[in-house]
Amino acid sequence: MQNTPLHSIEEIKAHFRQHEEVTYFISATNFNLMAIAAWVSHWVNVNFIDCYDGNNASVVVPEYSEVPVFKDIESINAFLLGNKKIVEQIKASQTDGKRVNAMFLFYDEALEAMVESLGMTLIMPPNKLVKHIDNKIVTTELGNSVDVPSVPNALTQVSSYSQLKEIMESAGLGDDVVIQTAYGDSGKTTFFIHDETSYQRVADKIEAEKQVKIMKRINCLQVAIEACTTRQGTYVGPILTEIIGQPELTPYPGGWCGNDINPGLFPPRLRETMVRYTESLGKALYEKGYRGYFEVDYLIDTANEDDMTVYLGELNPRVTGISALTNMSDFCRQTIPLFLFHLLEYGDTPFDLDPARYNRQVLDFVHPDFGQLVFKYTDETMKIVSDIPATGIYRPTPDGLSFLRYADHPSALAEGEIFLLRILSAGEYAYLGADILILFSRQQLQDAHNTLTPAARAYIAAVHDNVSYRELSAEEQQQVARYANPASAKRSASSE
């Protein structure tokens, strides 16, 4: 253990280059933390999906003779962590009393017990606390407690459309509302209600909840910021705008499908407000016992462009679908990835880098365009992938996509180049909502009015032209019919 405190960015870089602890990131893919292995020695990605066709040395995909039907991502992680070869590798890593860490995107109490039984150290908050904070109702109340306002809302149970109308009227929410359930993917559990017909389509989901969040619908830009709350304070990453509900990319009207690092869309006052709110939320989380990485969604009310208002949207107590973009941003490449503060918080080495100074540097940095598009399968009819681009760097051409070279991540894109991370492989099932691939570009992908840019539309067209599918055979249809969720291993590989 190193007892000398780390005082600077350079000292932190050197610390992780010489890092002796082994850290296993166990998840369906390594997408969320895809570039961390380039910064941290002995970083191992244990994944179910090999996005790199064996070319990424940090990715380990266990061998298996039979794959169960997975009910969720946690069951995928348990399958990976329980693999005999992975267990042997973990035991071999523990020689000479060396500490071995475990990191997940999603985990539960059963996974916590598995980590303990293997003699590993879980470098994440207790799952019970994470589940409590992950509740959107709790998020709203947490924000209220530190003067981070939410869009005008009501937190209550709904049993009928007539009751909803009464709540909307009494709370002054207008005739057009957005309803969110306490838990769940925002794309699947966010409902836009403007009349009884739109309510009845999702009434069973709303009425099954003990409490929902009913929000006034506003014209807004959605923003995402990641941060890390530590004993030194809260470190805040770059401001990202969200790409939501684009039908070419996602089947879900409220579904996340990409981001831009483009804080210049907002005046300095708004940027400083978002960072200040995030620092306040980080402090409140730490006081509740939560330590480490988290993400906040903000809704920027654009009704008055001269006086835009910042509202709290959601809080995700984990690494998320924007973590790759945050940690590969130009600011993080020139300093250190934000995620390294998470590792420091859970490590034994003291550090005293001033978070206020770091956050000011993020705000003052001129961030070049950098964004991602997440392609989900949007057809109701399940098919089999017959052709899909391999992971690597491409240049769009009038004839499609020209493969230039293999790369593990998109940190060194030249002008006009894009990076594709393949999720589905040829021969696999494509089903509604499945992640297909993820595109990174050094161009703006969405404007200030939530409209995809011409560059983004050209990229989307090129990708769709280069991914093909075939119909299921009679035998494959019979196989699908045996299972409620035949391809669940692929579900939410890029979950936010």
Image (spheres, rainbow, N blue to C red):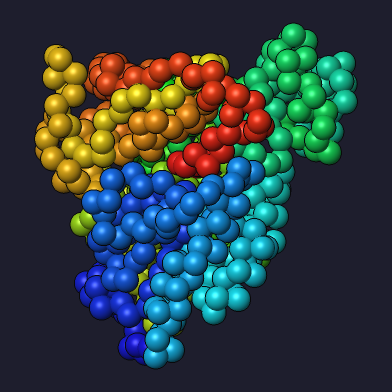
Q: Nearer the viewer, residue 165 or 432?
A: 432
Q: Is residue 88 above or below residue 212?
A: below
Identified at 73% across, 15% down, the residue is 201
Residue 21 located left or right of residue 120: left
Identified at 38% across, 43% down, the residue is 239
Q: Position of residue 102 (x, y in %)?
A: 49, 68
Identified at 29% across, 46% down, the residue is 52
Q: Is residue 365 above or below residue 43?
A: above
Q: Nearer the viewer, residue 124 or 54?
A: 54
Q: Is residue 468 above or below residue 18?
A: above
Q: Nearer the viewer, residue 120 or 281?
A: 120
Q: How many marks?
A: 0
Q: Position of residue 11 (x, y in %)?
A: 25, 76
Residue 72 located left or right of residue 442: right
Q: Quadrant of the N terminus?
A: bottom left
Q: Nearer the viewer, residue 395 or 178?
A: 395
Q: Position of residue 331 (x, y in %)?
A: 26, 52
